[in-house]
């Protein structure tokens, strides 16, 4: 960005500015076991401080809400499964019609468990599935082929993710639609992410910018970060720790 202060558009009008951040790889370091992921040191306290100053602070994730609620305070807006479920100030909500897909997701999870693909780990999130191959990248093509085959039979859609493949209901919900929802009416909005699924968040900021909203796109870089995300970002930081440092300037 041309300004020496990359977050100046957000800082200028805090009461009408929205801060949206991804979780894994952005707010929390990537770990081998997803259940072990925790926000970077100081991140929770920082987000709570920002919540008191800005119009909204929203954490958007592919994780289930039940997980997010164990590692983040209920005072924040938490959005899980790419917008299929969430909670605002502790009040839970679910995307209309999403619940009808629970049985299909469970059936696919059961069939995948019997597929016999060694080293693939199945994470059943209730409304969606994630097939992990972290630590065994050589099986990625097999995981992708298996996911697409089972998804087609069940009417689910496939989305690539970081060292994983995700299967979702055919519902128009992603990180971009979440940004659209929470940034409606805002004068400024920022989104921070690290993976291919965060590109829709950047796209939503582009739509807002065309309507005159001030926007900031922040990418957390890594060896696994998609080039398109880094190229489209206004600001690139090198880790969740660096993101916390950047956001701390908004206090």
Image (cartoon, rainbow, N blue to C red):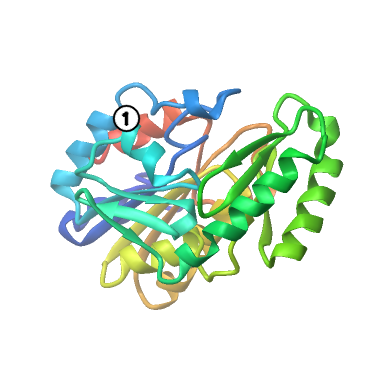
| Residue 229 appears in the rendering | no
Residue at image location 44% in from the left, 76% down from the top: 210
Q: Is residue 181 left or right of residue 29?
A: left
Residue at disc 1, secondary structure:
helix
- Residue 214 location, quadrant: bottom left
Residue 207 screen position, x and y as percent = 46, 73
| 15 relative to 236, above or below | below
- Against 105, is 226 above or below? above
Q: Give percent across and percent down for residue 237.
A: 50, 35
Left or right, residue 150 beside residue 85: right
Q: Residue at x 52, y 58 (%)?
A: 102
Q: Which residue is mark 1?
A: 43
- Left or right for 35, reference 248: right
| Label 1 Cα neighbours within 10 Å, binned few <14 / some 14-19 / many ≥20 | many
Image quadrant of residue 27?
Answer: top left
The spot of residue 36 in percent (x, y) is 48, 23
Nearest the camera: 208 or 116? 116
Note whether residue 127 is visible: yes
Q: Residue 122, percent across and down?
A: 65, 38
Residue 152 quadrant: bottom right
Specify whether 237 is left or right of 140: left
Residue at 53 percent of width and 30 percent of height: 238
């Amino acid at each position: 960005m041309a300004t020496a202060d990359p977050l100046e558009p957000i800082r200028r009008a805090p009461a009408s500015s929205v801060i949206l951040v991804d979780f894994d790889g952005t707010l929390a370091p990537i770990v081998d076991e997803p259940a072990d992921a925790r926000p970077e040191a100081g991140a929770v306290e920082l987000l709570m401080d920002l919540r008191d100053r800005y119009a909204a602070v929203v954490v958007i994730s592919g994780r289930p809400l039940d997980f997010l609620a164990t590692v983040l305070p209920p005072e924040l807006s938490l959005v899980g499964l790419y917008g299929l479920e969430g909670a605002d100030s502790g009040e839970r909500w679910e995307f209309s019609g999403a619940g009808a897909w629970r049985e299909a997701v469970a059936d696919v999870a059961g069939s995948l468990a019997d597929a016999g693909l060694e080293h693939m780990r199945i994470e059943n999130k209730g409304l969606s599935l994630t097939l992990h191959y972290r630590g065994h990248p050589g099986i990625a093509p097999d995981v992708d082929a298996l996911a697409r085959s089972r998804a087609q039979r069940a009417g689910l859609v496939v989305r690539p993710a970081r060292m994983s493949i995700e299967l979702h209901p055919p519902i128009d919900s992603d990180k971009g639609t979440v940004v659209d929802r929470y940034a409606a009416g805002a004068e400024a909005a920022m989104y921070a992410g690290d993976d291919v699924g965060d590109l829709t968040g950047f796209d939503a900021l582009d739509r807002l910018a065309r309507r005159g909203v001030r926007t900031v796109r922040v990418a957390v870089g890594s060896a696994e970060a998609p080039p398109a995300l880094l190229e489209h970002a206004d600001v690139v930081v090198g880790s969740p720790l660096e993101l916390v440092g950047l956001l701390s300037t908004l206090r």
